[in-house]
Image (cartoon, grey):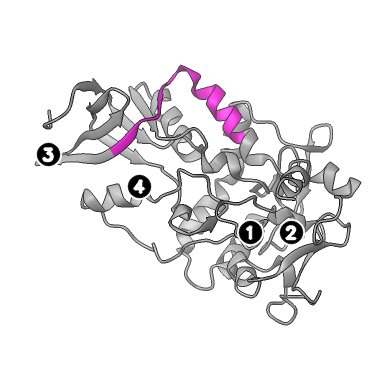
Amino acid sequence: MPAGTTWRADADVVVVGAGVAGLAAALAVHRRGRKVVVLSKVGATATHFAQGGIAVVLPDSQDSIEAHVLDTLSAGAGLCDAEAVRSIVSDGYRAVRDLVADGARFDESRSGQWALTREGGHSARRIIHAGGDATGAEVQRALDHAAAMLDVRRSHVVHDILVGPEGVGGVLVGNSDGLGVIQAGAVVLATGGLGHLYSATTNPEGSTGDGIALALRAGVSVADIEFIQFHPTMLHTPDAAGCRPLISEAVRGEGAILVDARGDSVTAGVHPQGDLAPRDVVAGPSRGGYVRAETNAFTSMPAPSVTSRSVFPPSPPRARRPG
């Protein structure tokens, strides 16, 4: 064992991260009869904070895989891997069915039919959601329940991936008992983003780029790290820093508009889809703007309307808290 370590464990696979990516991977490993250990340094995951919903083409609808692929390639501005896009989009409905099998429940417009909304970059209403704009919290709840039989260890910080002549050998981990080693022949990094490298972000506190650092130290090739997504709409107050409340992109899908301090549109003439343009397009001119919805859901923050409370229940309380 490495010097300074005081404990040891074994697994076939170690998964670092306990959000949707980490738990989905861990459940897949478990269902194949392998021993898996899931490590998470904090309680809150980026999955829990996700709001708007999941883009998916439903069977027996007027939407199509081809339309979703074209929307994605267009939003990617020529930078997408077309084969990967088609694979992911085509597999979307199966992945959602897996979430439902794990216990996730999505909002319905009527019994047996999921309610659909629209988000930026999409030409059709293909976003399923839960609790209005609490989709991530519902997905996390369902996966936490499904993964209850797994060995999930909270407050465990991975310091390094152990690599030897024969490849990956496990991870060096810190917890309340000190440094230890979990030996494993495979390590899955599912640690989320790096929003907290910036002064204000909609990411939870654990989003500090750990997975990228671990990969680099282990000699793994890392690509596309220049593509950092900034959500175009978050609740900003003077001197705001750290994790800020996110205003769901689906709010724009239901008619919200983006305006500047003078009340003028910040996206007019910028993109044919206006406020429903892809996120990178909207985020650019939105600096210094604020959200106003025609339903009075979000202005310079008067009392949220009945419409906003029923469609996006969690958003008004988050908006009220900063004052």
The residue that disc 1 covers is 68
Contact between marks 1 and 4 (CB within 8 A): the answer is: no
Residues 23 and 299: in front is 299
- Crowding around mark 3 (Cα neighbors within 10 Å: few <14, some 14 to 19, many 20+) is few
The residue that disc 2 covers is 124
Marks 1 and 4, how far apart at CA: 30 Å
Foreground mark, 3 or 2, reads 3
Q: Position of residue 119 (x, y in %)?
A: 70, 58
Say if residue 97 shows up in the picture: no
The residue that disc 3 covers is 166
The residue that disc 4 covers is 211
Q: Where is residue 216 in the image (x, y as percent from the top left)?
A: 26, 53
Q: Which amino acid does label 1 sit on?
A: His
Mark toward the start of the polypeptide (3 vs 2): 2
Examine the structure image and report whether residue 140 is included in the region drawn in magenta: yes
- The image quarter in which residue 134 lies: top right
Marks 4 and 3, how far apart at CA: 22 Å
Which residues lie in the magenta part?
Answer: 139-158
- Crowding around mark 4 (Cα neighbors within 10 Å: few <14, some 14 to 19, many 20+) is many
- Image point (58%, 26%), residue name: 102
User: How many numbered marks, from 0 up?
Assistant: 4
Q: Is mark 1 on a helix, strand or loop?
A: helix
Contact between marks 4 and 3 (CB within 8 A): the answer is: no
Q: Is mark 2 on a helix, strand or loop?
A: loop
Marks 4 and 2, how far apart at CA: 34 Å
Marks 1 and 2, how far apart at CA: 8 Å
Contact between marks 1 and 2 (CB within 8 A): the answer is: yes
